[in-house]
Every structure is written in C-alpha cells, then in structure tokens.
Image (tube, rainbow, N blue to C red):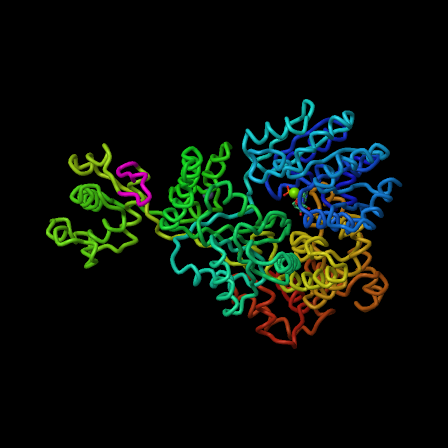
Amino acid sequence: MKSPSEVLQQYFGYNHFRLEQANAIENVIANKDTFVLMPTGGGKSLCYQVPALVLEGTAIVISPLIALMKDQVDALRVNGISAAYINSSMSAFEQNETLNQLKQGKLKLLYVAPEKLSADNGAFLKLLDEVNISLFAVDEAHCVSHWGHDFRPDYLFLNSIKKQFPKIAIIALTASADEITRQDIIKQLNLQEPLVLISSFNRANIKYFVQPKLSVFHHIVQYLNEHPNNSGIIYCLSRKGTEEMANKLKEKGINSAFYHAGISAMERSKVQEDFLKDKIQVMVATIAFGMGIDKSNVRFVIHSDLPKSIESYYQETGRAGRDGLPSEAILFYSYADVIKLRRFAMIEGNEEQSDLMLQKLQQMSDFAEVQKCRRQYLMEYFGELHHGNCNSCDYCLSEFENWDATTDAQKLLSAVFRLKERYGKNLIIDFLRGSKSLKITDYMRTLPTYGIGINNDKYYWQNLIKQLLISGFLRESNDEFPVLKLTEESNHILFKNKKISFKKVKEQAKAVTVAEIETNYATNEISEHLHLFAELKKLRREQAEKENVPPYVIFSDATLMEMATYLPSTKEELNQISGFGAFKIEKYGEIFLPSILEYCNINNLSSKIVEKIPKKQRESKKISEAGTFTTTFQLYKAGNTIEDIAKMRKLSINTIQNHLINFVAVGTIKASELMDITKIEPIIKIATMQTILSLKAIKEELGNAFSYFEINIALAHHKLQQ
Ligand code: ADP
Ligand code: MG
Ligand code: ZN
C-alpha cells in the first residue's frame, strides 16, 4: 500500500497536505465516516481522491453538477488516474460502457450524479453490490439539507447508502458554514460517529477592498487595463445590468461576455466554457453564475452591486484564487443599494423571513461601512477569532488620520432635531448644504440651520452620518425609506458639548497592480520573468485545446508561476515544482522544458531550483553543485571552449558560463581569459551609477555589443578588485 504522501507527490505533484487534508485522508483510509468543512478552494477533492488511490477498489463520488464532474474527471485523467463519470445526460450506450469498466474494476474513481443514484428505485446502488467499493464521497454535501442554500431533493436518497453499505466509509464535504446545516448533513447521510474536521475559513490569498460606488464603470475599466491578462468575474444585481456592463466593456476593447438565467441554456454553456478555457477574460454575471465553476485561476471578483448577505458575498468572492495565488475581491458600495435591496428583502406575509433577510442585509452593509479590518469582520461573522491587522484589506492598507467632528456633528444633529426627525439622509444633507431643491420647503429655508453645512460636500456629510450611525449617536428607522432619529447619545453632543473624533482615511488603499502582485508572490525578481510566464500560459492553452480540456486542468497558474520563478531545466528539477507529478513530468516535461531553456539562454539565466529545495536537502545539493563546478573548471583548463564543455556535459551554455563567472569572482580565472578587457570599464561606469544594480538596465544602456556574460564577468572582476 502506498502512503498518502507518496500518492500526493506521485499523482498530484504536491509536497504538503493543506489544512485538515491529512487528517481526513487518514480517517477515510481507516474506513471511518468523516465530515469535512473546508472553504472553497481549500482542497476538498484530495480528501477523497487520495484515499481512493491508496485503497483497493473503486471510490464512488456523488457530485451535484455535471459540468463539475466532467472537470474533475478530466483533471484526474490528466494526472494518469483512471476515472469516469455517469449521469443521465449520457446515452444508454455511453452509460453501459462506463458500467462495464466499473464491473471490471478498471476505475479508481467513479463520479455519479445524485439523480442517477435515485433513479429506478435505486437500481444503481443494487448494481454496486457486485463491485469492490473503497469509499463513498458526498461532495457539496449541503445539498442534502433543507437548511443549506442549495437543497436538492435527489440528495435525500443518499440516505440509503449507509443502509445498504454499512461497512464502507462515507466522507461528506462542504464549504457551507452554518451549524444547523452541518448537523443535518450528518443526520441525513446516517454518518456513524463521524470525525468532524473544520478548517479555518480565512482565505489568506484573497485581498478585500471596498470602494465607494462612484464612477464604477470608469474604475472597472481602469482596473482591467491594469490587469490585462487576469481572468475574473463581475457580479451585477440585474440581468440588464450584466448586459449593459458587458457591452460597454466590449466597446472599450475588453474581452468580456454576460451570463444570467435569462439566456438560453446553449448560450450559457457556451460562454461558460469559453470562460473556463480562458477565451473570455471577464465574465459579467448575475449570481446565477458560479455554482460549479471550479476554474482555479480566477484572479478577481468584483461586485458592482451589493450582495444580499455575507454568506453570498463570501461564497462569490471565494471563487477567486482557488489556486492559492494572490487574488482580489472588490466591492463597490453605496447606501442606495441597501435601500434598493431592502425592498427585495421584504416578503409579503412572511414577517419572520423578512426580518432574517433584513438582518442579513444589515450585516452586509455593516461589513462595507464599519471601520475595521474586513477579514476580521468576515471571520468573526463565521464564528472564528481573528486579530485584525491582516495587512491585505483596504482598511489595513489605508492610512488614517484623526478628525475632530464635534462642530459638524452638532450641525448635523441640530438639523435632524429642527426637522423633527422626519427625514432621511439625503434631505438632511440637502438642507445642510442649502440646496435649492423643491423638496426643501419655504418653511425649512427659514430655519437657522439651513445652509450651515455649505462648506463641505455631499460625501463628507454622508461619511459623517455613517460614522454617527455606527457609533450610536444617530439611528435610522426601520421603514422602507428610513428616516434619521436622534438617540440618548445624541443629547451629549447637542447639549453637553461632548467632543467626538473619528478616524478619517488619509490615503485609501486601492486594488494593486499586477506587477506588484506577481513580484510579491516570489522573493525573486519574478517580474523579469513575466515574459516566460506568458509564454508558458500560451503553451498550456495550446495543449488544453489539443486535449479539449480547460487550461487550468493541465496546470494551475501557481504551477506556471513556479516554473517562471525557478526555471527548472531538467525533468528531475521539474519534480520540485508543485503540480508536477511523475505522470505529468513524462507527459508534459518535453513540452514545457524547451521554452524555459530557450528563455534562459536568451537572458543568460540558469536554473534557480536550489532555492526551492528545502534547506536540509539544499546542503547536499550544494556539495554536488561544487562538484559540477569543478568538472567545468577542469574541462576549461584542459583547453575546451564553452560550447564544447556544454556539449560534453549536456548542460546549457548558460550554465557553463555561470560556472565560469563563479571562478572569476574568486580569482581562479582571469577576466581577460574570457572577454576583451577594454569592455570592462564602460560596464563598471554604468553599474556604479545605479542605485539598485540591474543587469537589464546596464544591458539596455550598452546595447548589443555587450553580452550578459560579459557584464557578469566585469562585475565579478570589479568586485574582486575592490
Ligand atoms: P474545493 O473543492 O475545496 O473548493 P479543490 O479540491 O477544487 O477545492 O482544490 C482547489 C485547488 O487547490 C486545486 O487547484 C487543487 O489542485 C489545489 N490543491 C488542493 N490541495 C493541495 C495541496 N495539498 N497542495 C497544493 N495544491 C492543492
Ligand atoms: Mg470542490
Ligand atoms: Zn485587514
């Protein structure tokens, strides 16, 4: 029997288990029921895929969405694992083919749609009697519960699995956080004393930004222009909104499409497929889009309208960054959206439901308005402790200054008082600013507070109202059009001269640019390798097209990024890249390696894979590297040219040149042996003028008459002299 870590490395090319994966896997292998709660992108699939490969027999995986099943099966096959799926959209012939494979024990995993299990009184389950089954996995297990957000009647039938196969372990997996759903799943599936594993819901690689909903289109275009190669989703509230946005984006030359429940099923699946295959960069969609999208390289999720609850917001933003790379969630917030959504939230004749929805909406708007770490707010909402200061949300990244609001708060509260607590924000602001609007009656104009707030703009007053509401110096009625009311606390400001100050944003953090993100990812000068990254993406797309699968099924962006960072030059080195298992190295090594080598040759670079190897192993690698340096040195001393040595040693010219540069640096080889020494002076002159040494800049200044090799030698020589 292989160990779980061997399987992880060999088939999936990963070195470490994440979150609770290892515990879940161990428990399933011990044939015990398991319940896994992990956020989207956490890596639930491996919790049953690894045991399926460790154990004898076939794992039966129940998964609700046909598109998802296909994706998962494609991804497994790309890793050399025999897997198949069966659902009612397939012809009887196709289904039979799959069943035959199953009976012959040829499949390690079989994905089954729930309706297939319940069809014909459970005929399929009976048929499984003849099969050697390793485990049952119920993915998206919240579908079994009425409490979950996506109940599916077919899931209820899953109840009979335990009855019919009491000796086989069931693993249930979901990202649905709440307690009632959790209990219900365990009950509905008849899990026997399950091990319950709950992972943190913090998605550390997602940055959260909330921006005022002003010039939204302009900001989105600007963002997309700064992120031209990134794939993402823009959520809009209405169908019409998605169409308008997508069309306007297209006019700006942005590769986008819209998606909502009102377009034909055929059109929907086409745009969805194009998005998965990176043929459409930006999907503008209603919330109808996303269930069953496992695209791992979604780099951003923008909400141009407010979601109706934190659960929706968290789920939708969670579609970003499944591959673990830095991603962004941007919410455009305005209070007008809250008012609009309030109307939707109120359900005639169902007060209880309406109250719940209004409460959820309130929490959503609090998230956008409260001055505190966004991540902390989210985590606390889901019942997890978080210390704040995440350093990756707009709040934590913004600069603040103190702002004495006493006088302006007095003006504002007096206005509310004078107008007898009968009006909403907008009128109060108009009144303060001395607006000529017809809503301001002649009587109002005679009041002393009319126009005393003219020196500040509308947004200033909106912000002040927000702060006063949050801190309880003001409240809002629960009406459809809420009006501002004074509170006990208001009196302290109005009549007792209480001083108040708030924090004011000095510099608002905005979603950062690609270059920054990609540099942050690795400590190396990865930005220099963006070219290679783009090239690798292209290769991946071509390969995906050949195999007719989405590109991210072949490799995640994270894998490509590692290749572009560490520049592996051999199959052995590819083994160190996360996402390259043995099978993929054989299958794709020869497709990707030549591009990396070529890139290294052009730029005079060589493999940096040693930087990736864990320290322990690095030491021994250093020793063998010392050996390889000596070999080059001996061949060089014996009179061979660099080209000859490269050929003899089956290494790239770069590598050999790099070896020799090292000997120049320690004085064993003289610079004059390798280059025309009159070239050294101009190189050093430019280099010493630079504050930060950049080979690229030196090269650009000097032009083609100088090679990177010569620049490197000159620098090594110069350093030695000093
Ligand atoms: P979930 O179903 O929980 O939303 P997935 O199972 O689809 O998440 O996994 C999300 C991504 O994370 C996939 O691209 C997967 O290959 C990757 N992944 C999962 N586990 C690991 C791991 N241990 N190391 C590296 N990547 C992983
Ligand atoms: Mg999943
Ligand atoms: Zn934060």
Q: Is residue 228 above or below residue 41?
A: below
Identify the image quadrant of residue 140. top right
Looking at the rendered image, the quarter that the N terminus falls into is top right
Q: Residue lying furthest right in this view?
A: 104
Rendering coords of residue 500 (x, y %): 25, 39
496 or 129, which lies in front? 129
Horizontal side, residue 164 vs residue 433: left or right: right
Residue 482 is one of the magenta-drawn residues: yes
Residue drawn at (21%, 41%), measured in percent from left and top? Answer: 421
Prevailing SS of the magenta stretch: loop
Rendering coords of residue 448 (x, y %): 11, 49
Residue drawn at (69%, 48%), measured in percent from left and top? Answer: 66
Identify the image quadrant of residue 714. bottom right
Task: Please state the quadrant of the image where ligand 2 appears.
Answer: top right
Rendering coords of residue 215 (x, y %): 39, 60
Residue 251 is one of the magenta-drawn residues: no
Q: Is residue 283 above or below residue 81?
A: below
Rendering coords of residue 664 (x, y %): 70, 62
Horizontal side, residue 342 vs residue 316: left or right: left
Looking at the rendered image, the quarter that the C terminus falls into is bottom right
Horizontal side, residue 352 vs residue 9: left or right: left
Identify the image quadrant of residue 586. bottom right
Residue drawn at (54%, 66%), measured in percent from left and top? Answer: 254
Horizontal side, residue 587 vs residue 472: left or right: right
Q: Is residue 595 visible?
A: yes
621 or 368, which lies in front? 368
Q: Is residue 104 above or below residue 281?
A: above
Q: Is residue 626 visible?
A: no
Magenta span covers which residues? 472-483
